[in-house]
Amino acid sequence: MLAGWKRTETRRGVAWTVQPVSAAQAVKEYTCPGCGRTVAAGVAHIVAWRSDGVLGDAADLAARRHWHTHCWSIA
Ligand SMILES: [Zn+2]
């Protein structure tokens, strides 16, 4: 379901895997952890999860968070 390029970014000493979600791929609503508002379906955004794997891959995937692109960029 997710496509596009992945990258790793560091926020406050924590490594995150970041992957863009295109408008066409955004078929559900999510709550952005940055601003607490809705990431509406059909809006391109990013999904981020911890890439250090301390909790294991399954837990990391379950902990993925969807952010407005802008909110992530200023987080
Ligand atoms: Zn936001």
Image (spheres, rainbow, N blue to C red):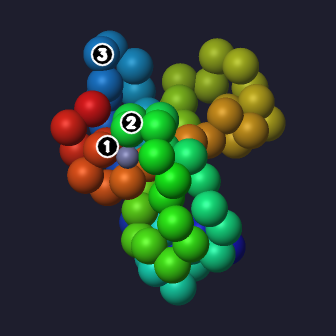
Few, some or many C-alpha atoms within 10 Å of disc 2 (few <14, some 14-19, many ≥20)?
some
Q: For disc 2, does the CB lie below 8 Å from ligand 1?
A: yes
| Circle 1 residue | 72
x, y (%) of residue 59?
76, 30
Residue 58, can we see it? yes
Residue 47, can we see it? no
Label 3 amino acid?
Answer: Arg
Q: For disc 3, does the CB lie below 8 Å from ligand 1?
A: no
Residue lying at 44% horizontally and 73% vertically, measured from the top left: 43
Gap in angstroms between the C-alphas marked 3 and 2: 14 Å
| Circle 2 residue | 34
Q: Residue furthest right?
A: 58
Q: 23 or 54, which is in the foreground?
A: 23
Mark 3 and mark 2 residues within 8 Å of each other at the beta carbon? no
Gap in angstroms between the C-alphas marked 1 and 3: 13 Å
Few, some or many C-alpha atoms within 10 Å of disc 3 (few <14, some 14-19, many ≥20)?
few
Residue lying at 23% horizontally and 44% vertically, measured from the top left: 73
Quadrant of the rendering where the C terminus is positioned: top left
Gap in angstroms between the C-alphas marked 2 and 1: 7 Å
x, y (%) of residue 5?
40, 66
Mark 2 and mark 1 residues within 8 Å of each other at the beta carbon? yes
Which of pointers 1 and 3 indicates the residue nearer the eye? 1
Residue lying at 38% horizontally and 38% vertically, measured from the top left: 35
x, y (%) of residue 56?
74, 26
Residue 44: mark: none
Few, some or many C-alpha atoms within 10 Å of disc 1 (few <14, some 14-19, many ≥20)?
some
Label 2 amino acid?
Answer: Gly
| Circle 3 residue | 12
